[in-house]
Image: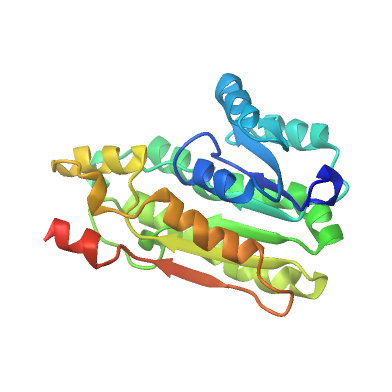
Amino acid sequence: MTDSAARPVVLVTGATRGIGKAVCDALAPDHELIVGGRDRAAVEQVCAAYEHARPFVVDLADEQSTTDAVAALALDRLDGVVHSAGMLGNGALTEVSRADWRATFELNVFAVADLTRLLLPSLQAAQGTVVVINSGSGLNAHGPGGIYSASKFAVRAFTDSLREEVRADGVRVSSVHPGRVSTDMQRELNAFEGRDYDEASYLRPESVATAVRSVLTATPDATYETISIRPGPAATNRRA
């Protein structure tokens, strides 16, 4: 595809780094990207790297900001949205406050649900795909760190219910659950756990992006409902 109008349009949140940026790289050759992030300079820098991309500068934790940003896009149709923005949330129960719980759920759950709601008419028009980057912690909970796992279990429930709600409209919904990925969030988690960070011990963001691309480009007869991506033997053996 060479014409921008003929390219599938995909909005990616958290697109300036980590998994979100890798997803943009994987889609850029044949998609039009809507690059989401809070920092305008960072978003515009990512957009400048692609031939077909435009910015979506928004604080997803702010309801009005999100509503206004979606309205400004003036989308007639949207072929996909990839929810990659999120926050870690750390600490044993005795170490986290109610405000910590609110902040984690605000970004990891409420923002995902609200943005999807706002984009749904455009997704329905295109019979598009919703992809939520979840976590292995959304499949199995281990403490401490229950605040993060709880948010990921909640957003997994959201994707499961949404899938059935929009199936008749031709909209596909996928929950992608990577294991540990070599990102800034992983550095933060390693510091919390008191261990040295070894990038080669974890999944590469590009590996997760490959799975996301498969979800978005699946033939119309198929839906990748839940995908678990675990570090392969080479990475696992380095941690042994």
Up-down relation of residue 42 to residue 231 (above or below): above
The residue lying toward the viewer, choosing from 231 and 227, is 231
The residue lying toward the viewer, choosing from 88 and 29, is 29
Name the residue rendered at 28%, 53% in the picture.
202
Q: Where is residue 179 in the image (x, y as percent from the top left)?
A: 34, 59
Up-down relation of residue 103 to residue 31 (above or below): above
Decide if residue 162 is in sight here: no
Q: In this view, does 40 lie to the left or right of 144?
A: right
Q: Position of residue 36 (x, y in %)?
A: 62, 36
Up-down relation of residue 134 to residue 166 (above or below): above
Quarter that holds the C terminus: bottom left
Figure quadrant of residue 44: top right
Q: How many marks on residues? A: 0
Up-down relation of residue 46 to residue 228 (above or below): above
Name the residue rendered at 86%, 38% in the picture.
74
Name the residue rendered at 57%, 73% in the picture.
225
Name the residue rendered at 55%, 59% in the picture.
212
Q: Is residue 143 left or right of residue 27?
A: left
